[in-house]
Each structure stands twice: as structure tokens, then as C-alpha cells.
């Protein structure tokens, strides 16, 4: 283990600087939440959704290159390591098409029709679906608490969608597209867990965002989207915020939190992202959630925490 990885890894017993870890987590999830506000502002101004998110992740991918060089010791050789097989490259392409093209494309299409807080709740419910798919596809065990979290999270999603009884047919197009964004993220997570491509964290992020963004731009061109003139300085400012701090920055801080606290523990705090999205949307856009949606968000948060809990070995 290198000196850098020793600094990033939790010490024996899972201890690490709690204040630093919490600061990284709060910063990452706050930036994730801010992306919904910036995206909603730009979509409300009439910017085409697929072009917007395509250029967002193209800029974010390029902004990741210095971090790839840092990860590889001031070299970009980590982008294409010699032992990267053809199967690895195919898996990286699939992850990029799922994680960036499908997830973010669906999210921005949904946000044209539904409020930013609801879109955030539907997207960040994905750990609930990951737990379900991991049980069905990877045959991972489903302990009692994780199963309870799965049920509470699903109930929370139903409340967030304001479903009554079995009236799934009453869902609007935006709600269905928003729900699909969370499912696509869950499928991408399962593919990543099974494939485990031989790439560093930042190299994988670069290829995922680059491949996904190019597919989004191609889809935008085929669907006839055009970026018309008249973009204001304020809108360019929101776009740059969306592309760099809210994309590259949030991902970077999230990966730092994963390294310090581990995937299981850190994923339990993912519910903070829709919380920040709701608070920032209320402050900037005046958007609010209904009582049912607020209760649904709380249940989703509890569900994520339960399905992300790590079994603690019993002391002798």
C-alpha cells in the first residue's frame, strides 16, 4: 500500500477523522443537490435538455484529466493501462451509456416536467433498487434490516410520487422518466460491481462521462435539438457551476468520502443529496414538497440508511 492510500484508508477498527469525513460528505452531497437547482434554472430558460447535459459532462470529463494525471503519478497512462482487455473496454462503454447517458439524460428530460426536489428524490432512491437487484442478480444475502429498508424505501418512493392505492396509471411522463433514472443508476452500479474494470477511479470516471456525453450529444442531434443564441452571462455561470463544481467537484469529493469511510457506510448518507436539493430549490426557486412527498423523502432516507448498513462483527 502506498503512503497516499494509507492516508486515505480508515485506520484499524474503522476509525478516521470524523470532522474531516463529515465535511467531505456534506460538501459532496450539497454540490450534488445544487446540480438540480442549476439544471432546473437552465431548463426553465428553454435550453435543450440533451444538449445541456451532454455538454455538461463533456466539460466535466475534460476537467477530470488533471485528477487522472494525479492518480497515475503525473501521467495520463492510467487512461489506457496495458492490461485493459477488450471486455474491460466494453464494460466501461456500457457503464458510461448507463450511468451518464441514460441516468442523466432521463433526469434532465424529467426535470422539464417535474420539480427539482421530486427529481432528486426519485434519482437518489437508487440504493434501494441496488439492494433489490443485488439480491435478484448477484444473489447477495438480504438480512432483515436491509429487507426492511427496501420496503420502507419503496413505500417512500410511492409517497414521493403521491400514488394512491395501485393507481400507477396515474403517473405523469415526467414522474416515470424520473423513476427510470434511478433504476438506470442501479443497473449501472450492478454492472460495475460485476465487471470491475481494471481502471483507476478517476480514469473510469473520465471514460464514463466522455462516452456518455458523446452519446447524449449524438442523441440530441438526432432528435433535432439546437442550442439557440441569446444565452446570458448568468446562464453561462450556472452552466459552468453545473459542469465543474456540481459534477467534477461533487464526484471527486464523493470518491474521497468512499475511500475514507468505505462504500457501505458512505452510501448511507446519499439521502443528504435530495435533502440539499430540496432546501436549495426552496431558497432559490421557491419550490416545495407536499406533506406526502416530505414523508416519502424521510422514508427513502431511512431505507437507504438501512440497506447500506454494514454488519458489525460481534466482539468475543
Image: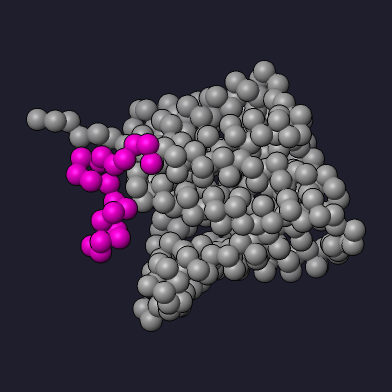
Which region is colored magenta?
1-20
Q: Is residue 106 left or right of residue 311?
A: right
Q: Is residue 91 left or right of residue 217?
A: left
Determine the residue positioned at 76% across, 29% down: 286
Determine the residue positioned at 40% across, 58% down: 194
- Residue 264 lies, in percent from the top left, at 37, 42
Determine the residue positioned at 9% across, 30% down: 316
Confirm whether the magenta stretch covers residue 17.
Answer: yes
- Residue 100 lies, in percent from the top left, at 61, 58
Colour treatment of the image: one colour
Q: Is residue 282 left or right of residue 183?
A: right
Tell me: residue 220, above or below residue 171.
Answer: below
The one nearer the camera, 172 or 74, is 74
Residue 309, picture quadrant: top left
Q: Main secondary structure of the magenta part?
A: helix
Q: Residue furthest top?
A: 291
The one nearer the camera, 294 or 135, is 294
Tell me: residue 78, above or below residue 52.
Answer: below
- Residue 214 lies, in percent from the top left, at 67, 69
Residue 192, picture quadrant: bottom left
Q: Residue furthest bottom?
A: 82
Q: Residue furthest front?
A: 233
Q: Quadrant of the N terminus?
A: bottom left
Determine the residue positioned at 59% across, 34% down: 276
- Residue 122 lies, in percent from the top left, at 62, 37
Tell me: residue 281, above or below residue 6.
Answer: above
Residue 290, picture quadrant: top right
Tell me: residue 90, above or below residue 12.
Answer: below
Confirm whether the magenta stretch covers residue 43.
Answer: no
Res 195 visible: no
Res 300 visible: yes
How many numbered marks are there?
0
Amino acid at each position: 500500500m502506498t503512503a497516499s492510500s494509507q492516508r486515505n484508508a480508515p485506520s484499524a477498527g474503522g476509525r478516521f477523522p470524523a470532522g474531516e469525513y463529515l465535511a467531505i460528505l456534506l460538501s459532496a452531497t450539497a454540490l450534488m443537490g445544487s446540480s438540480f437547482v442549476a439544471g432546473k434554472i437552465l431548463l426553465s430558460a428553454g435550453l435543450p435538455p440533451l444538449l445541456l447535459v451532454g455538454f455538461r459532462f463533456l466539460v466535466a470529463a475534460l476537467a477530470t484529466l488533471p485528477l487522472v494525471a494525479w492518480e497515475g503519478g503525473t501521467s495520463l497512462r492510467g487512461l489506457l493501462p496495458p492490461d485493459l482487455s477488450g471486455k474491460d473496454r466494453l464494460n466501461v462503454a456500457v457503464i458510461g451509456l448507463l450511468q451518464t447517458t441514460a441516468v442523466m439524460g432521463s433526469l434532465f428530460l424529467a426535470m422539464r416536467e417535474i420539480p427539482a426536489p421530486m427529481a432528486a428524490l426519485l434519482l437518489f432512491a437508487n440504493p434501494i433498487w441496488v439492494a433489490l437487484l443485488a439480491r435478484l442478480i448477484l444473489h447477495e444475502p438480504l438480512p432483515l434490516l436491509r429487507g426492511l429498508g427496501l420496503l420502507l424505501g419503496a413505500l417512500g418512493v410511492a409517497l414521493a410520487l403521491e400514488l394512491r392505492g395501485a393507481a400507477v396509471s396515474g403517473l405523469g411522463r415526467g414522474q416515470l422518466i424520473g423513476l427510470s433514472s434511478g433504476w438506470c443508476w442501479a443497473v449501472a452500479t450492478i454492472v460495475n460491481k460485476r465487471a470491475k474494470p481494471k481502471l483507476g477511479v478517476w480514469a473510469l470516471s473520465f471514460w464514463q462521462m466522455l462516452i456518455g456525453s458523446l452519446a447524449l450529444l449524438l442523441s440530441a442531434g438526432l432528435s433535432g435539438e439546437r442550442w439557440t443564441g441569446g444565452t446570458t452571462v448568468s446562464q453561462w455561470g450556472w452552466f459552468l457551476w453545473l459542469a465543474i463544481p456540481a459534477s467534477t467537484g461533487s464526484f471527486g469529493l464523493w470518491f474521497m468520502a468512499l475511500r475514507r469511510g468505505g462504500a457501505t457506510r458512505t452510501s448511507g448518507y446519499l439521502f443528504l443529496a435530495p435533502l440539499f436539493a430540496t432546501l436549495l430549490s426552496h431558497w432559490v426557486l421557491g419550490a416545495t414538497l407536499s406533506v406526502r412527498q416530505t414523508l416519502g423523502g424521510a422514508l427513502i432516507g431511512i431505507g437507504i440508511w438501512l440497506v447500506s448498513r454494514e454488519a458489525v462483527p460481534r466482539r468475543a
